[in-house]
Image (cartoon, helix red, strand yellow):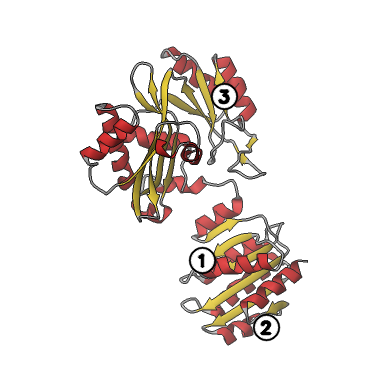
């Protein structure tokens, strides 16, 4: 689960990591009022930041510098309600529903600092770079020696490692930065974070270290033990189907194709999507109903697929083990009856209660195309969509 910048900074501030003074606004009037409040506290100018769950906002016009509260209001008026298109959003962009209005900083230096789950070594790694404000990949390509990478444990940072990081950033013996490092490390484990990135980490002209921008990704599998963060998962997407699937406990991601997919098991789902592409089409979604799914959830997931205007055919690919084929069949029949949809449906039900599942579908009179093999199912779905 990705956090908006203002949510990430709130977590950092609570953990003792300094962030710029800022106020979240959802209307142009609120943005102006926020600037007036910040200006009354001696701000030298303002930064208006569109709050979207994607990077590259600056290049897309989603970060604007303003001199006056009036200019802040104008910037917010231009951005709120618009769709910001960045290199990470895709061509449809992401709607802007909120702004973060911050004080401008007198920046002396910019660096990069992050804690990230490194799957290569199977643990969290600390990453620090002398240059901030750009993608870490670009920094590493330009100057590999500029990036420090070190694995860390769920324990206070070793003094030698802290000294290495401080020296790498040209801040030897800077106790404040050392304390920030440890606060970040502790936050990673306390909040089950997959990524905690500060880019840029800035040193101001008056000697303060601040997280000028922040990106946090929370392990959503651990939200059951993060009661303060769990409610944030409710509105992580503009896509109504993804939001509904999350509410139902289904693993669903919308894609750009025309073949709706319902599969049990992430590996089987990925193989199904690969075969759809092999036969010349694109999947419209990833939908893994899992092993312990109930009939109601199957029906709800099927309704999501049938109601998608981009879907031209639906492929249900179930290998019955823990999940029974008859349960899937009843859910599919319910969804078709509820929606009255007439889209072509390809069914592959193999395994537990397979014959019972076929009987349920046949008695319901639903015109489906049956497949025994996975490759055949993918081919039939692509042909049906055409």
Q: Are marks 3 and 1 in contact (CB under 8 Å)?
A: no
Looking at the picture, tell me which residue is in the foreground, 197 or 50: 197
Looking at the picture, tell me which residue is in the foreground, 214 or 69: 214
Give the x, y percent position of residue 65.
55, 21
Kindly give the residue lying farthest to the bottom in the view shown: 355
Residue that numbered label 3 is attached to: 64
Looking at the picture, tell me which residue is in the foreground, 87 or 73: 87
Secondary element at tag 1: helix
Residue that numbered label 1 is attached to: 266
Up/down of 286 relative to 227, above or below: below
Q: Nearer the viewer, mark 2 or mark 3?
A: 3
Q: Separation of disc 2 and disc 1 at Cα?
A: 28 Å
Secondary element at tag 3: strand
Q: Residues within 10 Å of mark 2 (few under 14, many from 20)?
A: some
Q: Earlier in the sequence, mark 2 or mark 1?
A: 1
Q: Earlier in the sequence, mark 2 or mark 3?
A: 3
Residue that numbered label 2 is attached to: 362
Q: Are marks 2 and 3 in contact (CB under 8 Å)?
A: no
Q: Separation of disc 3 and disc 1 at Cα?
A: 41 Å
Give the x, y percent position of residue 34.
49, 21
Up/down of 29 relative to 299, above or below: above
Q: Is residue 2 visible?
A: yes
- Disc number at residue 94? none
């Amino acid at each position: 689960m990705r956090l908006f910048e203002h949510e990430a900074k709130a977590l950092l501030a609570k953990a003792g990591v300094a962030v710029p003074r800022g106020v979240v606004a959802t209307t142009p009037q609120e943005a102006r009022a926020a600037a007036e409040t910040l200006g009354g506290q001696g701000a030298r100018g303002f930064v208006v930041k569109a709050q979207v769950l994607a990077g590259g906002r600056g290049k897309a016009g989603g970060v604007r510098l303003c001199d006056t509260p009036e200019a802040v209001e104008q910037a917010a008026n231009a951005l709120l309600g618009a769709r910001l298109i960045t290199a990470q959003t895709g061509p449809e962009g992401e709607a802007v529903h909120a702004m973060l209005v911050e004080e401008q900083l007198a920046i002396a230096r910019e660096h990069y600092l992050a804690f990230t789950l490194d799957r290569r070594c199977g643990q969290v790694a600390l990453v620090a770079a002398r240059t901030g404000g750009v993608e870490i990949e670009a920094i590493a390509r330009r100057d590999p020696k500029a990036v420090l990478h070190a694995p860390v444990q769920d324990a206070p940072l070793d003094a030698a490692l802290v000294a290495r990081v401080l020296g790498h950033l040209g801040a030897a013996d800077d106790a404040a930065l050392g304390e920030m490092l440890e606060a970040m490390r502790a936050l990673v484990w306390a909040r089950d974070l997959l990524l905690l990135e500060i880019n840029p980490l800035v040193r101001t002209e008056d000697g303060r270290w601040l997280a000028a921008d922040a990106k946090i990704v929370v392990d959503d599998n651990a939200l059951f033990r993060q009661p303060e963060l769990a409610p944030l998962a409710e509105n992580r997407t503009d896509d109504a189907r993804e939001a509904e699937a999350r509410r139902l406990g289904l693993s669903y991601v919308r894609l750009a194709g025309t073949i709706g997919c319902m599969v049990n098991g992430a590996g089987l789902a990925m193989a199904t999507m690969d075969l759809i592409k092999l036969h010349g089409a694109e999947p419209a979604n990833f939908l893994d109903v899992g092993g312990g799914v109930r009939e109601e959830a199957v029906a709800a997931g099927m309704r999501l697929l049938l109601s998608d205007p981009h879907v031209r055919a639906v492929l249900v690919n179930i290998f019955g083990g823990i999940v029974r084929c008859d349960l899937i069949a009843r859910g599919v029949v319910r969804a078709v009856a509820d929606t009255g949809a007439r889209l072509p449906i390809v069914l592959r039900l193999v395994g537990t209660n397979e014959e019972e599942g076929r009987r349920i579908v046949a008695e319901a009179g639903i015109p489906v195309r049956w497949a025994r093999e996975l490759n055949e199912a993918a081919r039939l779905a692509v042909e049906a969509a055409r």
